[in-house]
Image (cartoon, rainbow, N blue to C red):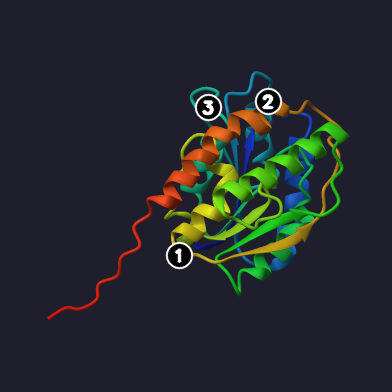
Amino acid sequence: MARIEYTVTAPVYNESENISELVERITAALDPLGKPWELILVDDGSSDDSFTLMKSLKQRFPALRALRLDGHHGQTAAMDAGIRAARGEVIVTMDADLQNDPADIPALINRLTSCDAAVGWRVVRQDDFVRRVSSKIANGIRNWLSDENIRDTGCSLKAFRASSIRRVKLYEGLHRFLPTLVKMEGGTVEEVEVSHHPRTRGQSKYNVWNRLFRSFLDLLAIRWMKWRKLTYKVADES
């Protein structure tokens, strides 16, 4: 099997209106790098024709791999499936709704020369007022309780050294804390400014409830994991 340098993976849930443009724009961003790459789209139990469209696009885009989960398991599960299926030395995660810009992927990949994970920071948000405020509050609470300094934990556009991200064990909802989990495994994380675009097609799958309140329990889990993490070193051996 040919060596793959880069894997881009995105969870897909009822995004049939965005998939074709997503694949085209990712191809336009990755082909100029001149390295073997693949795109893994993971259908998370969509009720529209997302998976059928993904399969049809393989004829035009041979780098595309289409996976389908056995039901609707959520963003973390779909992201984990893409990461586990990836063959690339670098793994890039992103959303499928075109709010993340594939043109930013090369900058994230290039930053990996100095770190294990390069995470997107959406400096100028293109969401409505309620979503911007809820995200700002969520970022602040997450960083405060988890003793972190990541400015945009909710940005899905991230690049990882495969050797680093594969050491992380994900549980439901913990995709929001991937930078922290990488650090807990000894990795280094840097932030990269990325673009953000408004959603123009399809419907958002998230609201204030699952951004703020449901993720609070996940945050407590991260806090507990950091508090109980083993930090010993072998002092001597004879």
Q: Earlier in the sequence, mark 3 or mark 1?
A: 3
Q: Circles 2 and 3: CB distance less than 8 Å?
A: no
Q: Circles 2 and 1: CB distance less than 8 Å?
A: no
Real-space Cα distance between discs 2 and 3? 18 Å
Q: Please give the residue where the numbered disc 1 appears in the rendered image.
A: 186
In the depicted view, which residue is nearer to us: 167 or 208? 208
Point 71% across, 39% down: residue: 96
Q: Nearer the viewer, mark 2 or mark 3?
A: 2
- Residue 130 lies in quadrant: top right
Q: Earlier in the sequence, mark 2 or mark 1?
A: 1
Point 61% across, 74% down: residue: 113
Mark 2 crowd level (few <14, some 14–19, many ≥20, 10 Å Cα): few
- Residue 203 lies in quadrant: top right
Q: Position of residue 56 (x, y in %)?
A: 67, 33
Q: Earlier in the sequence, mark 2 or mark 3?
A: 3
Mark 3 crowd level (few <14, some 14–19, many ≥20, 10 Å Cα): few
Q: Please give the residue where the numbered disc 3 appears in the rendered image.
A: 73
